[in-house]
Image (tube, rainbow, N blue to C red):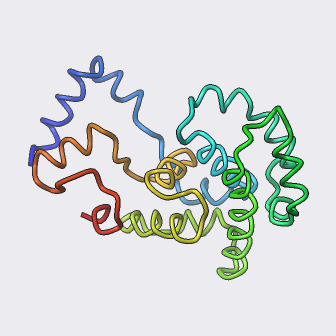
Amino acid sequence: MLAFAELYATACARKGGASAVEASLPKALAGDALQAIPDARFLSQMSRRIFRAGLRHAMVDKKWPAFEEAFQRFDPHYCAMLSDESIDKLLADTRLIRHLAKIKSVRHNAQWMLWQARESGRSFASFVAQWPVDDIVGLWGQLRKQGSQLGGISGAYFLRMMGKDTFLLTRDVVAVLKRYAVIEKEPKSMRDFKR
């Protein structure tokens, strides 16, 4: 495997220099800062990531104020109680992206967040913030298994959006891992993610 200095030099050469690379790096939040984020913001960003999957992010972001309004600013208690009739009304709202499985995922994920907060005796934000960084793939697994529409790399991208320290399996990362025989193909399973 290449030394980090060599990987960094390659990134600088391809991405426009060290300042461009440094500016593009994520800013992970400290545990206290992450825990201070209201669960409604976690649900909003989780939902935004889900709706972005397979679509142009700019288009989803442009519509997001309407989503905030329609889902009552993503209050987990409100979203967890959405009836099937309410979901039908959301599907008819032309301001939104009308995708049944993704709209239903808001209700499911709100219910899971509330359950997780009750089980742990703390907020969902605390659950995420206190998850050990050296087992970040385990947190991906929890998002994939307990959440809705958070499989593949969506869970990792959501965590990155929130400021949780995580890596991403971008095309470039996957190409390097394949080149050095860490993996044989694009990771899809938890076993592959852990490798």
Whether residue 191 sits left or right of residue 117 in the image: it is: left
x 24%, y 29%: residue: 11
**Rendering coords of residue 119 (x, y %):** 67, 82
Location of residue 69 with respect to 22 vertically, above or below = below
Q: Is residue 45 above or below residue 24?
A: below
Q: Where is residue 32, by image quadrant?
A: bottom right
Percent position (x, y) of residue 191?
29, 69
Q: Position of residue 121 (x, y in %)?
A: 70, 80
Q: In this rendering, is residue 31 above or below 132?
A: above
Closer to the camera in the image, 93 or 183: 93
Q: Quadrant of the C terminus?
A: bottom left
Query: What's the residue at 25%, 45% (across, down)?
Result: 174
Who is closer to the viewer here, 149 or 46? 149
- Locate residue 160 relative to residue 173 in the image: left or right: right
Residue 181: percent from left, percent from top? 11, 53
Q: What residue appears at the point 53 percent right and 64 percent down from the top-left corner?
A: 143
Q: Nearer the viewer, residue 159 or 98?
A: 98
Is residue 12 left or right of 97 when viewed as pictured?
A: left
Q: How many marks?
A: 0
Please give the name of the residue rendered at 58% of the width and 48% of the height, measured from the top-left corner.
162
Q: Quadrant of residue 190?
A: bottom left
